[in-house]
């Protein structure tokens, strides 16, 4: 939790309380339904919470922003972002029902009212969003295909509507056809070694229609 406060010192008391509760909620539910590896659960704030909140380092979502988290797994990056942006709406989608059970239980335990979940493949979602977020569920061309037509045209935020994708390693090959991407190195925001190879990719709407 100290890590979150180190990089986000201006949290409200309510946000701090919710972030503090995450560890016990995940540890409890992970014993029943394993959605986070044992190694990762012991470093939840570094590997999951702070990683998710990298998105908040490049954009402060305006109130009313609609965000879909594709392949949310145990609720990342959606749940930390929903705590950070309580006046935005988050739709967390996953094709594995047991993972969403954990998401729903954690969401309920925190009293978050700005999250809804759907058990389906993203291709079957028939809605549009200002941003689609995810943590490395597929190569970018595949992800763009899955989410085609799901980005809203009307802009609310300073950053152009599109995909915000957390991924690591060398992305040059899979991004070679996307000339308007912006790649942010997470070690520009965080000093911990875990983030040395981690990146955040912004792919604006032009390539996601």
Image: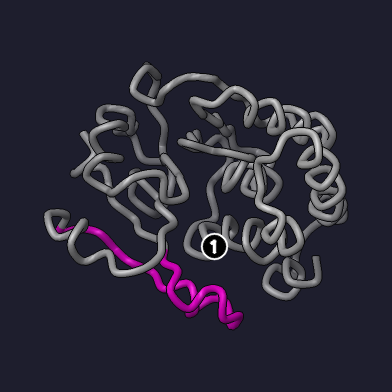
Q: Nearer the viewer, residue 19 or 113?
A: 19
Q: Nearer the viewer, residue 61 or 170?
A: 170
Instruction: Single out the residue that lies furthest toward the left.
Output: 177
Residue 8 is a magenta residue: no
> In the visual, does 139 lie left or right of 1?
left
Residue 57 in the image: above or below residue 143:
below
Q: Secondary structure at mark 1?
A: loop
> In the visual, does 194 lie left or right of 109?
left
Determine the residue positioned at 71% across, 46% down. 83
Determine the residue positioned at 76% across, 61% down. 42
Quarter of the figure that contains the N terminus: bottom right
Determine the residue positioned at 26% across, 27% down. 149
Quarter of the figure that contains the C terminus: top left
| Extent of the magenta region | 179-199
Would you name the residue on which mark 1 appears?
54
Residue 168 in the image: above or below residue 191:
above
Residue 113 in the image: above or below residue 172:
above
> In the visual, does 23 lie left or right of 83?
right
User: Could you tell me residue 119's position as x and y percent?
Assistant: 54, 20
Q: Nearer the viewer, residue 131 or 190?
A: 190
Determine the residue positioned at 49% across, 25% down. 95
User: Could you tell me residue 146's position as x and y percent?
Assistant: 29, 31
Dot 1, how many residues are within 10 Å of its Cα: few (below 14), some (14-19), or many (20+)?
Answer: many
């Amino acid at each position: 939790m100290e890590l979150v406060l180190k990089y986000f010192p201006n949290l409200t008391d309510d946000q701090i309380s919710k972030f503090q509760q995450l560890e016990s909620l995940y540890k409890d539910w992970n014993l029943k339904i394993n959605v986070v590896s044992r190694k990762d659960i012991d470093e939840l704030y570094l590997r999951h919470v702070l990683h998710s909140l990298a998105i908040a380092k490049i954009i402060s979502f305006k109130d009313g922003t609609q965000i879909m988290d594709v392949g949310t797994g145990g609720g990342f990056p959606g749940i930390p972002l929903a705590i950070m942006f309580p006046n935005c709406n988050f739709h967390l989608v996953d094709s594995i029902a047991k993972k969403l059970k954990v998401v729903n239980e954690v969401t309920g335990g925190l009293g978050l009212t700005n999250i809804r979940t759907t058990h389906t493949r993203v291709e079957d979602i028939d809605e549009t969003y200002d941003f689609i977020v995810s943590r490395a569920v597929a190569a970018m061309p595949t992800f763009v295909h899955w989410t085609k037509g799901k980005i809203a045209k009307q802009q609310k935020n300073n950053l152009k509507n599109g995909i915000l994708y957390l991924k690591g390693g060398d992305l040059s090959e899979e991004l070679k056809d996307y000339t308007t991407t912006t790649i942010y190195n997470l070690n520009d925001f965080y000093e911990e070694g875990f983030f040395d190879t981690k990146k955040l990719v912004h792919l604006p709407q032009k390539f996601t229609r």
